[in-house]
Amino acid sequence: MDERARPAQDIGMTSMDTTVNAKARQSRPLKFILELGPLGLFFVANYRFGIFAATGVLMVAVVAALATSYWLTRRLPIMPLVTAVAVLLFGSLTLLLHDELFIKLKPTIVNAIFGTALLGGLAFGRPLLPIVLDTVLQLDEAGWRKLTLRWGLFFYALAILNEIVWRTQSNDFWVAFKVFGTMPLTLLFAVSQVPLILKHELKSEPTDTKG
C-alpha cells in the first residue's frame, strides 16, 4: 500500500506512539535527577547541620520533586509517590519525637513494601512491575515473571542491607550509603537485567508499506 493511501487515523496513531516513546526516553534523565536530587540535598544538609535538619530538607525536597514531576508530565509515578508519602510520614515522626530511628527505618519499610507487592502480585498471576517501576517495556509473559521475581528479591535485599548498615554504622555513614550506595547498586542491578529484557522483549512487526 502506498504511504499516501494509509488512513489518516493510522498515521496519527503511529505519530502518537512515536511521540509517547520519545517522551518516555527523554523523561529518563529527568526521572533520575528528580530521584537523586533530594538524596543529594539530604547528604549535604546532614554534613552541614545534622540528621534532623537533613530530614526536614529531605521532606521538602521530595515534595518539590514530586510536584515538578507532575507539572512536567501531568501524572504521578507510583514509586516516587509511595516514597514521598513514606518520607513525610517517617520524617514527621523523626522530627516530632526527635528520634532518627524512624527516618532510618523508612528505606527498610518502603523496599519491603515494593518487594511484597511484586512477589505477591506474581503469586496471584498479576505482575505489578510495570506499575511499580513506571516502565514502558514490552515483554512476553515469561519475561515479566522472571523480571518481577528478580526485582522483588532485589527490593528485599535492599531492605536487609539498610537494616545492616544503620544498625552497625554511624549516622554519617548511613546517609552516605543512601546516596552513594543504594542508587549505584540499583543502577547496576537494572543494567544487569538488560540481557533478560532483550531476550523476552516483544518485537513490533514492521509495517508493510508496499501493499
Image (cartoon, rainbow, N blue to C red):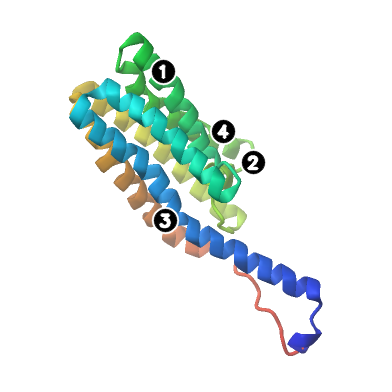
* Circle 1 or circle 4, nearest the eye: 1
Could you say which disc has been placed on residue 120 in the image?
4
Q: Secondary structure at mark 1?
A: helix
Question: The N terminus is located in which quarter?
Answer: bottom right
Instruction: Compute the Cα span from label 2 to label 1.
Output: 37 Å
Where is mark 3, residue-wise? Answer: 29
Give coordinates of residue 139: x percent, y percent.
Answer: 58, 58
Instruction: Compute the Cα span from label 1 to label 3.
Output: 30 Å
Instruction: Compute the Cα span from label 3 to label 4.
Output: 30 Å
Q: Secondary structure at mark 3?
A: helix
Q: Mark 4 is on which residue type?
A: Gly
Where is mark 2, residue-wise? Answer: 125
Give coordinates of residue 174: x percent, y percent.
Answer: 24, 30
Could you say which disc has been placed on residue 36 in the image?
none
Q: Quadrant of residue 54?
A: top left
Instruction: Compute the Cα span from label 1 to label 4.
Output: 29 Å
Q: Mark 1 is on which residue type?
A: Ser
* Circle 2 or circle 1, nearest the eye: 1
Number of labels in the image equals 4
Give coordinates of residue 179: x percent, y percent.
Answer: 28, 39
Q: Mark 2 is on which residue type?
A: Gly
Q: Mark 3 is on which residue type?
A: Pro
Q: Quadrant of residue 62?
A: top left
Q: Quadrant of residue 101?
A: top left
Question: The C terminus is located in which quarter?
Answer: bottom right
Q: Earlier in the sequence, mark 1 or mark 3?
A: 3
Q: Is residue 52 left or right of residue 200?
A: left
Where is mark 1, residue-wise? Answer: 92
Question: Which residue lies at the image location 54% right of the left edge and 41% below the top edge?
Answer: 132
